[in-house]
Amino acid sequence: MDSRWARGAAGAALLLGLAAWTGGAREAVRAGGVVVAPREVQVSHLGDGVLRWRELDGALPGGPALVAERVVEAPRGEALGFALADGLTPGAQIGEGAPLLQVGAPALSAAVAARQAEVAEAEAALAVLEAGARLGDRAAAEAEVHVAEAQLAQARAFAENARRLREQGAAPAFEAELAALTAGVAEAERRAARARATQARQEPLAVEIEAARRRVDVTRALVAEAQARVATTALTAPFAGVVARPGGDVLLALRSAGPPLVQVALSEHQRARVEVGDAARFWPRAGGVPMPGRVVAVASEAAVMGVRVVVWATVALDGAAPVGATGEVELLGGGPA
């Protein structure tokens, strides 16, 4: 009797232990998923003269989530121009800081060229003054003297001819008076031109040299400012990755290298059976062998997807999978495999 009771008690204890063990285990969960890049940058152009730069984080549950955005616009009234950097073909791998896109507008480039021309002119003028002469001003002033003398000679000849015609009665008096007045004006213009030439021949003053130096500094600063405006429109890679050309409005995408991620849409009931660190398998809908992975994140709150309420989980795959691929994910409850 005692032995039968002992055997029955041992059997009951075994059944209770088995029930406790099986009750604590979590069943596998199956749900749909889509492959995303851990990080992605998209540059899009909608045809409205504006470039949009969007940085996406695929590691956040429910991602890719927008984490940074930048808008590049042309100056008012100008057309926006842009060109992809050389070698940016689909599948090309580039490093952090590599050029992606050069954006510009005609006004920006023209402003740089104009400012550079001003610098060259200011530097040349300073060099002349520091050499102790106003060579350019002197040449221009002497040319003005020659022109004024030629105009004076012509005016005098015209006035003399008008005077003779008046004496002969072949021209009215007012024409001779007007010609004489014109000659007088030409004489005054010659005197002014000679005065300017005399001033140009004098040695430059220290204050003139200092003013020329300030002009050089100012024009150089304006060049730097114009070049900075152009430089800020050069878009570079914020991380190393692989180039993609998705098409449509997206001119260029850069996807970070490394294991791809799968965003999995769980029901609220399934969420209770999934934990970070659980092993997973991904079956691509297009076919192929399943890829192993593990759960790296589970959202703390539910989200609405169409008519469904879902909780997003993120799975990191051990193998390669194309971004955008869909399939079924099996989440193996009970911790890592």
Image (tube, rainbow, N blue to C red):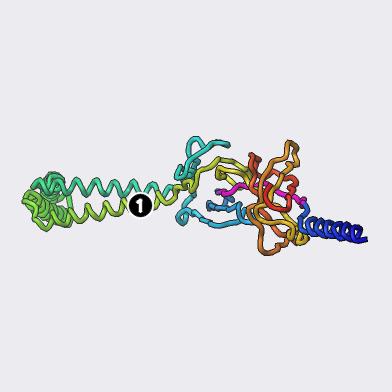
Can you say whether 249 is above or below 303 in the image?
above
Horizontally, is 186 left or right of 259 in the view? left
Residue 192 or 236: which is nearer the viewer? Answer: 236
Instruction: Give percent across and percent down for residue 10.
Output: 84, 58
The overriding secondary structure of the stretch rendered in magenta is: strand
Outermost residue on the right side: it is: 1
Residue 47 or 135: which is nearer the viewer? Answer: 47
Residue 33 or 118: which is nearer the viewer? Answer: 33
Q: Indicate whether residue 188 is drawn in magenta.
A: no
Can you say whether 76 is above or below 37 in the image?
below
Residue at the location (65% across, 40% down)?
322
Q: Is residue 117 visible?
A: yes
Query: Badge 1: few (under 14), some or many (20 or more) residues near its Cα, within 10 Å?
Result: many
Q: Amino acid at mark 1?
A: Ala
Horizontally, is 114 left or right of 77 in the view? left
Q: Is residue 167 visible?
A: no
Horizontally, is 42 left or right of 24 in the view? left
Q: Indicate whether residue 34 is drawn in magenta.
A: yes
Q: Quadrant of the N terminus?
A: bottom right
Instruction: Give percent across and percent down for residue 321.
Output: 66, 40
- Place residue 221 in its image quadrant: bottom left
Residue at the location (68% across, 43% down)?
292
Disc 1 element = helix
Identify the magenta region.
28-40
Instruction: Give percent across and percent down for residue 176.
Output: 14, 53
Can you say whether 130 is above or below 12 in the image?
above
Q: On the image, numbered disc 1 is attached to which residue?
A: 226
Horizontally, is 91 left or right of 223 in the view? right
